[in-house]
Image (cartoon, rainbow, N blue to C red):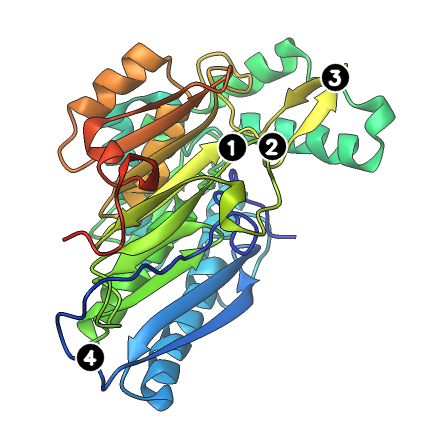
Amino acid sequence: MYRWGKVILVLLFAVQLFGCSASKETDYSEYRKYSDTFFDSFDTVTQVMAYTKSEDEFKRYFNHIHDRFLELHRLYDIFNSYEGLNNLKTINDQAGMQPVKVDQEIIDLIQFSKKWYKEAGPETNIAMGSVLDIWQEYRDEASANPALAKLPPMAELQAAAKHMDMDKVVVDEEKGTVFLTDPDMSLNVGAVAKGYATELVAQEVKALGLESAIISAGGNVRAIGHPYDGVRHRWGVGIQNPDRIVVTEQDNLLDTAFIHEASVVSSGDYQRYYEVNGKRIHHLIDPKTLMPGDYYRAATVVTEDSGLADFLSTIVFLTPYEQSRAFVDKLEGVEALWVLKDGTIKATAGMEKMLKSHGASGTDK
């Protein structure tokens, strides 16, 4: 099974796309709406909805998206090896032994992650695989036998935490290699890879000519342009209510954000968790405490770049509110929403302007 560090706004259950009505301003009569879905990459459901002039045109874009997601899935996989391909698992397997020659997409993902690790903080340390592996083991054991569910011993986590130094992830751009100098460390890109892949593919299909589409990779939502239906200027993206896991209709959503050329990504305690003595133990692990973050039920980030939105949603979720809010406020083009433990909702001013609950709609320019 292909497992990732977080699952966000799970498509078909937590993300729904809603239309709105308004006066027709532009004639888009040549365009029709098409959609398709695939299930074979990043252990999630990926839906593509687009407005194109023909079904054949849509299929060309869709096939490119699907093919590239499969390629990136294999490159960023930390659990499986593929014949003739060096991927992240190869890098982990060769930790402490030798540099690994890899494709540029891996170099770029690691450099992106290292950059934001330095600029934003340690909450999304892709080198903490040693710690996350322990949590995954205990989560799997709890899933197999819930009655025996327990927390990992702190001593075991602390020992593993000695092997998550990002400075020991050595990238040689000229040679195209990655080397983990600590033999006991490993990479885990679950907090960023899916969003990063979504953004990469979105940019590729835009360059190929796609102007109106929305890609939702397990809820990592990336909107391209606006709906070419002659009605809307923004796409409506449902934000999951943490208390209602199965979303079947609009009333079960927390809210709807209306976006144009942007991404929506959420992190929450409602996915990939188990219970110990009635307490929910979720999968979003704070590298400072080595325990699940305990500040919110969920946090949502909106910004243009889906990789950055994926990355930042983890930071926002794992940081106390005042610090988290100050962090978001200093970032240009980034908006956020927090669902506190008691259900209180906080949002930046820019986020509020996007929300249906504050009067926003798909017809807003």
Quarter of the image where one finds residue 172: top left
In the image, is 167 to the left or to the right of 29?
right
In the rendered structure, which disc, 2 or 3, sits on the residue that comes first in sequence?
2
Kind of element beneath mark 4: loop
- Going 32% across and 27% down the picture, which residue do you hit? 167
Q: Of tags 2 and 3, which is closer to the observer?
A: 3
In the rendered structure, which disc, 1 or 4, sits on the residue that comes first in sequence?
4
x, y percent for residue 143:
77, 35
Kind of element beneath mark 2: helix
Residue 28 disc label: 4
Residue 133 disc label: 2
Neighbours of disc 4 within 10 Å: few (<14), some (14-19), many (20+): some
- Going 16% across and 38% down the picture, which residue do you hit? 333
Neighbours of disc 1 within 10 Å: few (<14), some (14-19), many (20+): many
Q: Give amino acid for label 1.
A: Gly
Residue 278 disc label: 3
Q: Is residue 256 above or below residue 166?
A: below
Q: Distance between the Cα atoms at labels 2 and 3? A: 23 Å
Q: Distance between the Cα atoms at labels 4 and 3? A: 54 Å
- Going 62% across and 45% down the picture, which residue do you hit? 246
Q: Give amino acid for label 4.
A: Tyr
Neighbours of disc 2 within 10 Å: few (<14), some (14-19), many (20+): some
Residue 129 disc label: 1
In the image, is 186 to the left or to the right of 352?
right
Residue in the foreground of this view, choosing between 195 and 82:
195
Badge 2 vs badge 1, beta-carbon distance below 8 Å: yes
In the rendered structure, which disc, 4 or 3, sits on the residue that comes first in sequence?
4
